[in-house]
Image: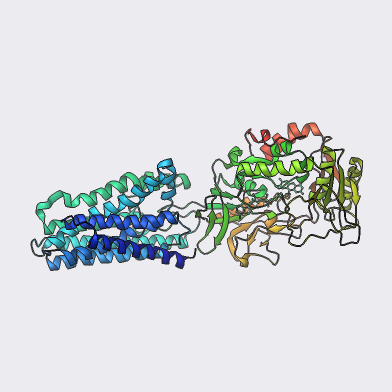
């Protein structure tokens, strides 16, 4: 929902709340006590806002209520009070309340991103509450703040309803404290807003008011409530201490809940925050609701968001976590690699031991925060990405540096949909079972995925007829010709029927995203082919870039990058892997550009020179994956090198890949999942 539409929705909620409260006052039970009638109407209005919060699954509906309700209470008391309080004092307190309210509401308005965003504390509170989340949402997020503000406003009630003494020195003190507090809060918010906008990565906010207080804006907020208590004291000195009860309750909430929650969050997210808590400035009180736009963070450490945790995203994140705060975003519940389709289809239990790994098993990711969500948007100016979680909640992640590694969609095996572990399991199992049950399989395509699939299916099920159809004279056109010569001999030994010169007609509207049955027609003139299963691997890749602004993309929708892997015009945005338009083959994943990228991200943050990515002109690497006689890896010049089978399982995977490349992967349950039926 756009910001304007969101604002309209919030305004509607408040108008409804006002109407409901007015109706309550007019036709509801009369308690005979003005303050109690106002309290009940305030609670009824809060319930109305709560209804909107629940309907939109976003408790931030309530945020502005904090600053909007007090002038309404004030107006109500002023109009209805009989007898009325001292006119000059009433006017003075009204001035302070209205200035405070307008300022704070405007501050909320400026920082309001829209209803896709929710204050980070609310989901945390609801999550902690478990089954009591509705009660916590109602009481802790909505009713308690309403009661606190009401308690803070009671001195105003006293001012407006007790004639008391005429204006005195205490009123002047109260007005000076109130207006001074508002000024303090305003300057603090402006300083923080400017800092967040212009900050350089790693910079610490220790200037201006923030240099002497950890929470100058909160201190200002408390000052405002104290000033109301002082006005009350001036109007009715006999009421004494309880006039300060509201301000004291706020102080208790700030010190007991708001500050600890916020500081805990900063400690978790920003390594340098511990130093600030230990060494910085005045311990000042905090207000829950009106933090600066970056969540009240006073120190910013470089924060790198890795968008997409596939093959390159994981490797990049692993290389960065020791140096910066890393947030990895993935639509998958762990690494579900795009590599080795053939082995994945033929021997999924083996494949997932090496290529499906929960994020918690990567030692290098332990310091990172991984978010299971779909990327839905990028705000380049605000330096934040938008995400949607499985329950439909939209959140935001801010970054100093963004690494785009969202890969491509390819066939049925690489899709960006948000999946649970059970759904990943089901995908693996169903493709395998379909092929296991087939007596004949047609594989369409001439790239590594198609060739590897044909070889692995034939090796796994020797009785199954496997046909490989490819358009040119030879398959693997992007590899050196020697590679095809070697691989062809192997395919022939395995009994794969080779059909060069076949270009399939892709049925209208079919995205090649499932294994099909039935005939395949050929635009190259041959008879249609019939088989029990057709694997479409025609290399129709689509970049996963729907969430990115078009200005970052080339004509084919891939992310434009400089040789340094930076997006032109946006040096804080990098891209790597299959999504990055690095070279015609978009080969930065297999060429391990994650290392260069991690280095360049650090160089960018430190203001050092960046290095360039130089891709080889031809594809290289493994085509068939590990076979019973070992793993054959082809160099760019087409020469093949065989790694013996025994060393694949005892040296290559555990030591070279898990330790050398991934920097440590703990044992997991992955290999027990998804057993093959035959
Ligand atoms: C070490 C290594 C060795 C390799 N060896 C070979 C080889 O021998 N032969 C060969 O042919 N190739 C090889 N490759 C390359 C490989 O085939 C692919 O190029 C590689 O899988 C691409 O990785 P990627 O990170 O770009 O994309 P992916 O692995 O597809 O990762 C993209 C991730 O982003 C997620 N995503 C996408 N959109 C969204 C969204 N909107 N919101 C949230 N998440 C999203 C996807 O779900 C996925 O998890 C190798 C790669 C590596 C890293």
Confirm whether residue 37 shows in the render: yes
How does the figure colour the protein chain or chains?
Answer: rainbow
Residue 517, given in percent of the width and then of the height, sits at 79, 50
Residue 190 can be seen in this image: no
Q: Quadrant of residue 33?
A: bottom left
Res 225 → quadrant: bottom left
* Image quarter of the C terminus: top right
How many numbered tags mark residues here?
Answer: 0
Left or right: where 422 falls relative to 179: right
Residue drawn at (31%, 66%) of the image = 102
Q: Is residue 590 above or below residue 27?
A: above
Residue placed most toward the observer, 317 or 555? 555
Q: Position of residue 367 (x, y in %)?
A: 54, 42
- With 407 as the anchor, is 322 left or right in this view? left
Q: Position of residue 336 (x, y in %)?
A: 66, 45
Q: Position of residue 97 (x, y in %)?
A: 24, 63
* Residue located 73% across and 44% down the image: 431
View extreme (left): residue:
165
Q: Is residue 517 left or right of residue 43?
A: right
- Eyeballing the image, is 259 above or below 183? above
Q: Between 73 and 269, which is closer to the camera in this rendering?
A: 73
Residue at x 17% of width, y 52% of height: 243
Give left or right: position of 148 versus 552.
left
């Amino acid at each position: 929902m756009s910001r304007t539409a969101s604002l309209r929705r919030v305004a509607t909620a408040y108008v409804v709340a006002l109407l409901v409260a007015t109706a309550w006052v007019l036709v509801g039970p009369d308690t005979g006590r003005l303050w109690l009638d106002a309290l009940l109407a305030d609670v009824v209005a809060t319930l109305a806002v709560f209804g909107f919060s629940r309907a939109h699954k976003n408790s931030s509906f309530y945020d502005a209520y904090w600053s909007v309700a007090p002038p309404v209470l004030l107006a109500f008391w002023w109009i209805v009070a009989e007898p009325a309080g001292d006119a000059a004092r009433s006017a003075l307190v009204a001035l302070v309340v209205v200035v405070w309210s307008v300022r704070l509401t405007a501050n909320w308005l400026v920082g309001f991103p829209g209803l896709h965003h929710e204050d980070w504390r609310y989901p945390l509170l609801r999550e902690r509450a478990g089954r009591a989340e509705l009660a916590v949402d109602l009481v802790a997020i909505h009713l308690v703040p309403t009661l606190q503000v009401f308690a803070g406003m009671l001195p105003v009630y006293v001012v407006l309803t007790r004639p008391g003494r005429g204006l005195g020195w205490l009123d002047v003190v109260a007005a000076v404290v109130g207006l001074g507090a508002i000024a303090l809060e305003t300057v603090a918010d402006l300083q923080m807003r400017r800092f967040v906008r212009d900050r350089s990565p790693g910079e610490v906010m220790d200037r201006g008011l923030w240099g002497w207080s950890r929470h100058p804006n909160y201190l200002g907020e408390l000052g405002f409530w104290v000033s109301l208590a002082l006005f009350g004291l001036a109007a009715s000195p006999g009421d004494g201490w309880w006039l300060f009860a509201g301000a004291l309750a706020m102080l208790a909430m700030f010190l007991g809940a708001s500050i600890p929650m916020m500081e805990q969050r900063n400690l978790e997210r920003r390594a340098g925050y511990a130093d600030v808590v230990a060494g910085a400035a005045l311990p000042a009180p905090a207000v829950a609701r009106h933090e600066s736009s970056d969540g009240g963070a006073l120190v910013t450490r470089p924060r790198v968001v890795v968008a997409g945790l596939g093959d390159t995203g994981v490797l990049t994140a692993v290389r960065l976590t020791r140096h910066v705060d890393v947030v990895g975003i993935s639509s998958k519940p762990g690494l579900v690699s795009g590599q080795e389709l053939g082995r994945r289809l033929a021997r999924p239990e083996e494949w997932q031991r090496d290529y499906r790994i929960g994020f918690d098993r990567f030692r290098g990711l332990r310091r990172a925060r991984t978010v299971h969500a779909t990327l839905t948007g990028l705000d380049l100016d605000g330096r934040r990405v938008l995400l949607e979680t499985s329950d439909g909640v939209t959140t935001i992640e801010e970054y100093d540096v963004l690494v785009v590694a969202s890969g491509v969609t390819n066939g049925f095996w690489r899709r960006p949909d948000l999946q649970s572990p059970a759904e990943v399991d089901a995908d693996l199992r169903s493709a395998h079972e379909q092929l296991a049950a087939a007596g004949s399989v047609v594989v369409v395509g001439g790239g590594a995925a198609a060739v590897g699939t044909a070889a692995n299916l034939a090796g796994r099920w020797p009785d199954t007829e496997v046909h490989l159809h490819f358009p040119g004279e030879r398959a693997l056109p992007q590899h050196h010709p020697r590679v095809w010569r070697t691989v062809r001999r192997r395919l022939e030994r395995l009994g794969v029927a080779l059909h060069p010169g076949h270009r399939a007609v892709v049925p209208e509207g079919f995205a090649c995203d499932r294994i099909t049955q039935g005939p395949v027609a050929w635009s190259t003139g041959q008879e249609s082919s019939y088989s029990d299963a057709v694997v479409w691997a025609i290399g129709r890749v689509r970049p996963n870039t729907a969430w990115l602004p078009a200005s970052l993309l080339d004509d084919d929708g891939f992310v434009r990058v400089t040789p340094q892997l930076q997006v032109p015009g946006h040096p804080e945005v990098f891209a790597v892997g299959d999504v990055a338009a690095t070279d015609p083959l978009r080969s930065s994943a297999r060429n391990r550009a994650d290392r260069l990228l991690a280095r360049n991200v650090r160089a960018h943050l430190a203001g050092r020179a960046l290095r360039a990515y130089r891709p080889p002109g031809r594809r290289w690497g493994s085509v068939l994956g590990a076979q019973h006689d070992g793993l054959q890896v082809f160099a760019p010049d087409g020469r093949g090198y065989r790694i013996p089978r025994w060393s694949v399982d005892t040296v290559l995977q555990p030591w070279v890949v898990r330790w050398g490349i991934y920097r440590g992967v703990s044992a997991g349950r992955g290999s027990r999942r998804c057993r093959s039926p035959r």
